[in-house]
Image (spheres, grey):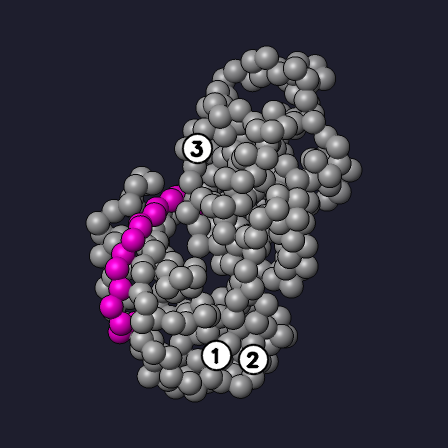
């Protein structure tokens, strides 16, 4: 078999790059062994404002301009609904918090996403001693549904193998590479924290941050917006809500933990006051980078090897933009955004 690309990993990063390949009529084979679950368990929320500091998300406007049509086209292509527009209500913790909200209107990259009028309403079951601020142009993508549906789509194309990729099996030839029975021009690694076992890119400063969420059933909680407080409460419909998330830098397992559950329950007590039942708990490892920019680029020696990783908590927004940037770099020689290029970590 001969293909243009092998893609290792099918989270949001790998999926977005595969779409670039399909649009360009490139041939490819995806390797996915189900070992990396961060996209499958992600909250999937896209939010153009960092509400902890009322600061702008990196290139938020530009990313949304690429991401929104991207998900719309995927919905049409796969005949599913995964992108839900939703209003985010930030519950203020103090008067100072509210004042910081208004101060944010002096930031040109933040102000367009904030409503000027505060919400003073009371919502049943929501603990809020102060007002709410509304964030516009936000929403959430059902990443689990999207990726599982996309895997099935690739199965019908015979373009995915559910096998572990063996890095030592790459044979470098003069004009191409051989991987087992496949002759390939380029290999892209989008394997999440699995890059730690990748001998070609494991030198990059990728951090493993475990995140856990719970899904609760609460008939008395009737909010139709995403509530952002010490954690997020996201309505899923039919009185179900996703609640998250934790950030654990020590636990490197993808298994739900008692500690994670207890942390979420303790925080949730400060956010809602109505009864609820926990129905599920999920966990995954986020691939994150200290400077909060993705890891994108080519290997310094083996220039036919590339990486697309480190999307962190904002993969839904970032993935389509960085995938397009990398594809144009590989195929047309377009310069990579210096803020995401892995060359920034070279001596």
Please state if 154 lies on the left or on the right of 4 as rendered. left
Quarter location, residue 330: top right
Residue 321 vertical placement versus 93 (above, below): above
Distance of label 2 from label 1 (alpha carbons): 7 Å
Report the residue that reaches farthest toward the right: 332
Q: Position of residue 69 (x, y in %)?
A: 68, 54
Mark 3 or mark 1, which has the lower sequence index?
Answer: 3
- Which region is colored magenta? 272-291
Q: How far apart are marks 2 and 3 (CA)?
A: 41 Å
Is the C-beta separation of discs 2 and 1 under 8 Å?
Answer: yes
Numbered disc 1: secondary structure: strand
Residue designated by label 1:
133
Which residue was labeled with disc 2? 115
Which of the two labelled residues, at mark 2 and mark 1, occupies the earlier sequence position? 2
Residue plotted at (31% across, 65% down): 218
Q: In this view, does 309 lie above or below 27?
A: below
Q: Distance between the residues labelled 3 and 1?
A: 39 Å
Within 10 Å of disc 3 (Cα), the crowding (few <14, some 14-19, many 20+) is few
Residue 23 is marked as none
Q: Taken as a whole, is the magenta stretch helix, strand or loop? A: strand
Residue 248 percent coordinates (x, y): 32, 50
Residue 70 locus on image (x, y percent): 66, 51
Q: Nearer the viewer, residue 333 or 283?
A: 283
């Amino acid at each position: 078999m001969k293909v243009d690309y092998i893609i290792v990993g099918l989270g949001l990063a790998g999926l977005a790059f595969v779409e670039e390949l399909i649009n360009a009529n490139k041939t490819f084979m995806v390797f996915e062994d189900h070992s990396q679950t961060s996209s499958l368990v992600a909250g999937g929320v896209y939010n153009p404002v960092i509400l902890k500091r009322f600061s702008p998300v990196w290139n938020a406007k530009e990313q949304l301009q690429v991401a929104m049509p991207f998900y719309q086209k995927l919905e049409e292509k796969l005949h599913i609904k995964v992108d839900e527009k939703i209003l985010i209500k930030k519950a203020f913790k103090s008067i100072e918090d509210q004042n910081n909200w208004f101060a944010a209107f002096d930031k040109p990259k933040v102000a367009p996403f904030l409503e000027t009028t505060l919400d003073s309403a009371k919502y049943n079951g929501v603990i809020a001693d102060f007002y709410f601020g509304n964030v516009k142009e936000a929403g959430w993508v059902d990443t689990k549904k999207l990726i599982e549906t996309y895997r099935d789509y690739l199965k019908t194309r015979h373009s995915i193998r559910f096998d572990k990729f063996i890095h030592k099996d790459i044979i470098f030839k003069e004009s191409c590479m051989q991987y087992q029975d496949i002759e390939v021009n380029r290999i892209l690694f989008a394997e999440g924290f699995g890059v730690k076992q990748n001998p070609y890119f494991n030198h990059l400063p990728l951090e493993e941050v475990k995140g856990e969420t719970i899904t609760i059933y609460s008939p008395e909680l009737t909010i139709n917006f995403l509530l952002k407080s010490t954690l997020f409460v996201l309505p899923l419909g039919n009185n179900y809500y996703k609640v998250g998330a934790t950030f654990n830098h020590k636990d490197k397992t993808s298994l739900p933990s008692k500690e994670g559950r207890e942390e979420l329950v303790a925080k949730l007590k400060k956010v809602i006051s109505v009864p609820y039942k926990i129905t599920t708990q999920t966990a995954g490892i986020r691939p994150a980078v200290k400077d909060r920019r993705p890891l994108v680029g080519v290997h310094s020696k083996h220039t036919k090897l590339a990486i697309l990783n480190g999307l962190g908590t904002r993969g839904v927004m970032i993935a389509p933009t960085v995938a397009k940037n990398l594809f144009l770099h590989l195929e047309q020689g377009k310069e990579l955004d210096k803020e995401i290029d892995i060359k920034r970590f070279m001596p």
